[in-house]
Amino acid sequence: MTGLVLTLGESMGLVRAVEPGRLELVSTMTLGFGGAESNVAIALARLGVPVRWVGRVGADGVGRRIARELRAEGVDVVALEQHDAPTALMLKNTVAGMTVVSYYRKGSAGSMLDPSDVERLDLSGVALVHVTGITLAISESARQATRRLVVRAREAGCLVSFDVNHRSALWAADVAAAQYRELVADVDIVFAGADEAELVLGAREEPARLARGLRALGPREVVVKLGEAGCHALSAESTVDQAAYSVNVVDTVGAGDAFVAGYLAELLAGSPLETRARTAVLAGAMACTSPGDWEGAASARELEELATRGADPVKR
């Protein structure tokens, strides 16, 4: 299958501490950006997949930087400028080896996505639409826009993938779980961490049972992301348990998004489930080797180098 991937969501300015320590004691910070959907878009573009990112940004320098950097990475950008709201920000620092992320996104331009933004999108040539639970959570209008995009995608014959990507700070678990279950029933591919799958299903189970439980809700494929344990993937034809790969971990933020991009790239290439899972864990591992949300996203050649240089599967 060939064609464009379209993803919808919020991208934010990322202010990152250069040295480790408490934020109030850090003296130097750098400006970048990040966001689950734009991370996936960049990772797909680096793997040679045509991709379009759609979102709202403020009429400010941060919004213009996001659009500029995405285009520089080869992503087709539909950045709708919001003149009465700013682009959201997140601050990232490291304390005692743990990454701490603080969000400033309430009332942001990105949260003002609405169904009218989706209605004017041209879906011709789009093979797959990718959405996440974050966009469901940031506002009611963004939630409606996500649901409308899924409906339009299905009507247009596009595949739809959904990464649960739960953010507990954005909404209550019971409200989120109900919304996730509704969307899972309407998509083709679902990605979820084990804890996210448990949230959706309301039960603690081992990965294979979680995957079967999610698939029973309607999607044709389910991938349970297991971090340093790899992943469990389930389709109508087969099941795969894929171990992770050993790398020197610098920053795990964005690894899940790179994982999703690796899987989707192979899906669109017509690769079997085993190859999709293998590329996904390779892409996720590679993303852990660099700071930032998307900077460590790898090319196909870099993933092959990681796979063939003798890295032992098990831990990242």
Image (cartoon, grey):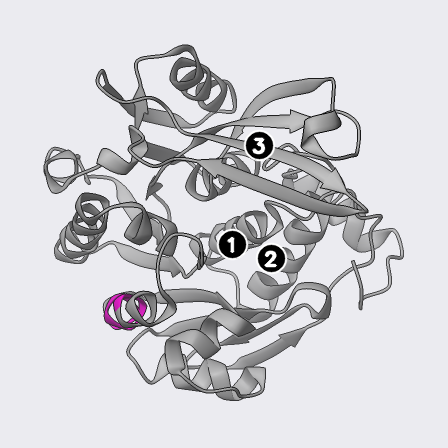
When the figure is inspected, residue 177 is found, relative to residue 145, above or below; the finding is below
Where residue 146 appears, as percent x and y from the top left, is 23, 50
- The residue under the point 38% across, 52% down is 170
The picture quadrant where one finds residue 5 is top left
Using the rendered view, name the quadrant where residue 68 is placed.
top left
Depth check: 103 or 117 in front? Answer: 103
**Looking at the image, residue 71 lies above or below residue 282:** above
Do the residues under discs 2 and 1 have CB atoms within 8 angstroms?
A: yes
Residue 148: % across, % down: 15, 51
Q: Residue 280 carries which label?
A: 2
Tell me which segment is drawn in magenta.
Answer: 179-185
The answer to whether any part of residue 128 appears in the image is no
Magenta region includes residue 120: no
Q: Is 36 above or below relative to 84?
A: below
Q: In this view, does 31 lie to the left or right of 171?
A: right
Q: Which residue lies most toward the front here?
A: 24
Rendered residue at 79%/27% (across/down): 19
Q: For the residues labelled 3 and 1, say whether their Cβ atoms are less than 8 Å apart.
A: no
Q: Which mark is residue 91?
A: 3
Q: Which residue has dot 1 on it?
A: 260
Q: What element carries label 3?
A: strand
Tell us which disc is closer to us: 3 or 2. Answer: 3
